[in-house]
């Protein structure tokens, strides 16, 4: 089988990689590019552990082919922080202890960031709806919802300041 050359932007940086036609974006991220933050939980788009942002929209990277990244702007969990400065969602997940085993956390953080990029003042219902594609078997979700609410409040204060 021949490999496809993909030119894209990942976490704000130009990126190129070779992939097989049937390789998922998740496999390309983890196995080809060494970006192992996105996790494979189900391989069927049901758990959200592999959530990435592609051209501003959340995507389960286990359902996207690597070749589909051609010309796209991709953000993974590795691209959420700005250097050593955590994104408010990441910081609030820590402060609210919104994780236990941590397997689902990258997907939740990426999805929550995408929500707050689109809606600076989501209601609890909107947050729950937005994160409904992300599953956690440990936390019970309340701390996750509170962390996102707190991050939204902090981000609104930063915008006003």
Image (cartoon, rainbow, N blue to C red):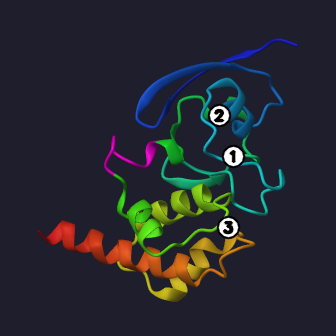
For residue 61, the mark is 1
Residue under numbered circle 2: 29
Residue 80, magenta (yes or no): yes
Report, in whole angstroms, how far the alpha carbon at label 2 lies from the one at label 1. Answer: 9 Å
Secondary structure beneath label 3: loop
Indicate whether residue 17 is drawn in magenta. no
Depth check, mark 2 against mark 1: the one in front is 2
- Dot 2 or dot 3, earlier in sequence: 2
- Taking the spot 39% from the left edge, 48% from the top edge, the residue there is 81
- Residue 120 seen in render: no
Badge 3 density bin: few <14, some 14–19, many ≥20, Cα 10 Å: many
Closest to the observer: 26 or 103? 103
Against 67, residue 158 (above or below) is below
- For marks 2 and 1, the one nearer the N-term is 2
Q: Which sits in the foreground, 139 or 55?
A: 139
**Magenta stretch in the rendered image:** 79-85
Looking at the image, which residue is at 59% across and 68% down?
A: 99
Q: In the rendered image of this protein, does residue 31 appear above or below residue 47?
A: above
Q: How crowded is mark 1: few (under 14 residues within 10 Å), some or many (20 or more)?
A: many
Q: Is residue 76 above or below residue 91?
A: above
Where is residue 129? Give x, y as percent: 60, 79
The residue that disc 3 covers is 134
- Residue 106, by quadrant, is bottom right
Q: Quadrant of residue 34?
A: top right
Q: Is mark 2 on a helix, strand or loop?
A: helix
Any part of residue 88 in sight: yes
| Crowd around label 2: few <14 · some 14–19 · many ≥20 (10 Å) | some
Identity of the residue furthest to the left in this view: 161
| Quadrant for the N terminus in the image | top right
Rendered-image quadrant of the C terminus? bottom left
């Amino acid at each position: 089988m021949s490999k496809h050359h993909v030119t894209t932007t990942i976490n704000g940086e130009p990126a190129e990689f070779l992939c097989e036609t049937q390789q998922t974006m998740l496999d390309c991220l983890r196995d080809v590019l060494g970006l192992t933050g996105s996790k494979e939980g189900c391989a069927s788009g049901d758990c959200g552990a592999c959530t990435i942002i592609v051209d501003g929209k959340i995507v389960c990277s286990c359902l996207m082919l690597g070749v589909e990244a051609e010309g796209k702007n991709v953000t993974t969990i590795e691209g959420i922080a700005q250097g050593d400065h955590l994104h408010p969602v990441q910081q609030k997940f820590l402060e609210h202890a919104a994780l236990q085993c941590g397997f689902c956390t990258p997907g939740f953080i990426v999805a929550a960031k995408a929500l707050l990029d689109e809606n600076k003042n989501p209601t609890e219902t909107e947050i729950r709806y937005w994160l409904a594609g992300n599953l956690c078997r440990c936390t019970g979700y309340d701390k996750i919802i509170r962390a996102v609410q707190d991050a939204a409040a902090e981000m609104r204060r930063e915008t006003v300041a």
